[in-house]
Image (cartoon, rainbow, N blue to C red):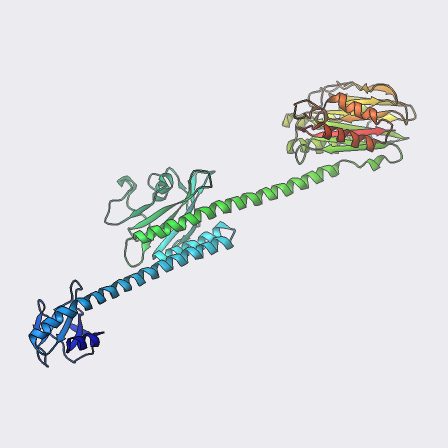
Amino acid sequence: MLDSLGALVQGRVRLWRFDGRGLKPSGAGDPGWSPTIPRASGPVPTPTGSVWLARLGDLEGFWLEVDAGDEERSRIAADKVAPIVAALLESERHRGSMAEELAGRYQEIDLLYAISEILGQTVRLDEATRTIVREVSTVVGAKRASIMVHDTGADVLRTVAARGFGVDGLSPVRVDDECSVAAKVYREQRTIVHDPEEMAELSGECGNERGYKGQAYLSVPICYGAPGLPVRCIGVINLTDRIGGDRFTHSDLKLVAAVANQIGAAVENARLIERDLHQQQVRREMELAHDLQLKLLPSPSVLHGDAEVAARCLPAESVGGDFYTFTRLGRGRVGVMLGDVASHGFSAALVMALVLSAAGIHAAASVTPDETLSALLDSLSNELAETEMYFSVFYGVLDPLAGRLSYASAGHPYAFRVPRFGDPERLETTAPPLGLATPGSIQRKQVPWSVGQDLLVLWTDGMVDARNEADEPFGDRRLLDEVCAHRNDHPEQIVQAVLAKAEEFGSRPIDDRTLLVLRI
């Protein structure tokens, strides 16, 4: 370019630059000498003769040498070419500045992309935040950095990742701590960037011991706003001890704010994933508990040869408090028990398991139903008192040889004898529910039994209390009508018909439901 300009002015054009000690050639070759620095544009003597040295506008340190043969021609030529060279140098300087800025932007864009990759590939928040802290602190030149996440249960900020110091043993920061920059950033949901030359935002009562070397710090809130919901703060990212100058730039602030937005979404996603995994685990455990509880209930095959029986137990939740059992008592006699713990869910299921365990022992050891329930009350009285729970229970012994049903009913009104012809007969209660009954208060009753014809039908209140969309209960009458309509069928068919009727009625169960039908 300088050669072309020299040809244009029919002379020589050379560019000089001041390096702090003298002028050094920056174009058109090194002549082996250096001109003196004039105070203003003008002629300067050189070993080869006088030349014109012109200052290049506002470009400090740059001078243009023009030799067009004599002083006047050199001055006129300098006036022509100096603005051109100044404009070209200014353009080059801007291009260099833009290249430097683009390089910085590229580094920032690369960081944001890398963080997106990190958050997209990792599920565990602790792994992602450790990598993010390292990458962000490297780009902004901070020796120390940390990410703190809000613990909603304890209402504190906990450090989940750090660079430049360890997180083990760090105490959480209370959200209402007036001496904590991070707590202030979290509470006010705004960035605090501190310059050592500016006044600190914290009061003098908090002291100046900050625990790190640098005075400048940058704390940015980590916020997240789900669609349609207000933005809320869920943590803070902190940086300090900046390398190469104790001050964070506006560019640093924008970059960390962009990263904080990504972290906010990642924290929320990680929490949702963790919650979902926990819920999946709970569901698996509930399903296991459901299966285990149903396995406690005996199969109808236990009475094969002595009686025809069908039963269904449908907990309102995964587990419940309804139960039934039957026992062979010898000489064709069969013991049948059905009950309902006054609750549902896990607490009722635990009592139900205790009842079934004790019932098997007492039914085999007792002679009459009232003795069985009295023994059951005695063995469970402490547990029932401690849990403040009770349960209704019916226990009957069918004796085909004597043609009778002996039973005791502790507060359980849902027991009926359904004959082959005629109306169902309610088997009245003989005592309050166990847990409310007192020792010696349980009585026994007997009713005649037609072998091969009569049905014993037992259920819990969940069957008849279930309501449809019109808020009507299914009720005893509908249940018994369906049983009577199928009274000559096998018990399994009767149970299926009743449950189908309840389904057709549109009943919505609010409690455990159990139905048992037996013919002997």
Q: Is residue 482 above or below residue 189?
A: above
Q: Is residue 3 left or right of residue 75?
A: right
Specify whether residue 490 is in view. Answer: yes
Q: Is residue 180 left or right of residue 487?
A: left
Q: Viewer-proximal residue, 16 or 368?
A: 16
> What percent of the width, then of the height, locates residue 86?
19, 66
Q: Residue furthest right?
A: 401
Q: Quadrant of residue 415?
A: top right
Q: How many labels, in total?
A: 0
Q: Quadrant of residue 150?
A: top left
Q: Is residue 491 left or right of residue 461?
A: right
Q: Is residue 363 above or below residue 158?
A: above
Q: Residue at x 41, y 54 (%)?
A: 133
> What percent of the width, then of the height, locates residue 119?
48, 53
Q: Viewer-proximal residue, 511 or 345?
A: 511
> What percent of the width, then of the height, locates residue 391?
70, 25
